[in-house]
Amino acid sequence: MEPEPFRPDGGTTVADLIDALEREAERDRPPAETPEIGVVMGSDSDLDVMMGTDDDPGAYHALRALGFEELTDYDDPPAGRSFETYVVSAHRTPDLMYAYAGTAAARGLDVLIAGAGGKSADLPNMTASIVFPLPTVGVPVQEKSVDSVLGMPTGAPLTAVDATVSERLHRLGTPGFRDGRD
């Protein structure tokens, strides 16, 4: 029997959300029905920065400019490339963060974009260590978060946002991209 479909708004507790992520990871879905990119942030108060404005674009602007649509209805996914959004906290909901990142590849994600709030910016750093070898893009939500994103140890699977990240995201569909030939 196929697991029940994932409904991000269907869980009311952290345990419900973890169960839903695990069920979705077990489903056998065609890639066209799964988002390519996961966007996570530690708090819903980070959403304004991640969305951005016309004068100060954020991660959402970049994704939409590259042709991605936000996936909000898992039973009726957009026809093109898509991304999903979650609020997971490395400090308040670490089990949910581990479940989200740990099921990312099985749920079809190719890239994780993690908002880095606060001075320690733990969310991008911790999710990067869990989703490896998938790339993680750290987005500083506050100015004091920049050093934590840039200060990862050598070899850490995390990148700071720059122009090449947008270009690589654009090439997700390019043959050879996923196996490192491109």
Image: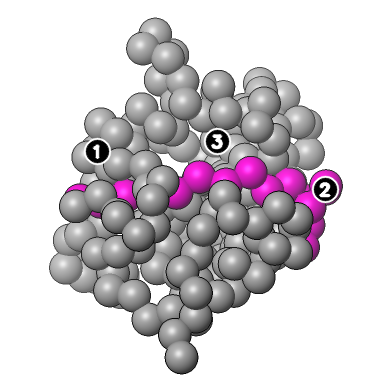
Left or right of 155? Residue 93 is right
The span from disc 3 to disc 2 (Cα, nearest Å) is 18 Å
Density class for disc 1 (Cα within 10 Å; few <14, some 14-19, many ≥20) is some
- The percent position of residue 53, horizontal first and vertical second, equals 42, 14
Kind of residue sitting beneath label 1? Leu
Left or right of 19? Residue 114 is left
- In the picture, the disc for residue 66 is 1
Q: Is residue 150 visible?
A: no
Picture residue at 58% right of the left edge, 67% below the top: 21
Q: Which residues are magenta?
A: 80-95
Q: Nearer the viewer, residue 112 or 107?
A: 107
Kind of residue sitting beneath label 3? Val
Left or right of 12? Residue 66 is left
- The percent position of residue 22, horizontal first and vertical second, equals 59, 74
Q: Earlier in the sequence, mark 1 or mark 2?
A: 1
Q: Are marks 1 and 2 in contact (CB under 8 Å)?
A: no
- The percent position of residue 85, horizontal first and vertical second, equals 50, 45
Quarter of the figure with the C terminus = bottom left
Q: Are marks 3 and 1 in contact (CB under 8 Å)?
A: no
The span from disc 3 to disc 1 (Cα, nearest Å) is 17 Å
Residue at which label 3 appears:
139
The span from disc 1 to disc 2 (Cα, nearest Å) is 32 Å
Above or below: residue 161 compared with residue 135 = above
Kind of residue sitting beneath label 2? His
Find out whether residue 87 is within the magenta segment: yes
Picture residue at 19% right of the left edge, 52% below the top: 79
Picture residue at 36% right of the left edge, 27% below the top: 61
Q: Is residue 100 visible?
A: yes
Residue extending farthest to the bottom is 1
Q: Earlier in the sequence, mark 3 or mark 2?
A: 2
Residue at which label 2 appears:
91
Mark 3: which secondary structure?
strand
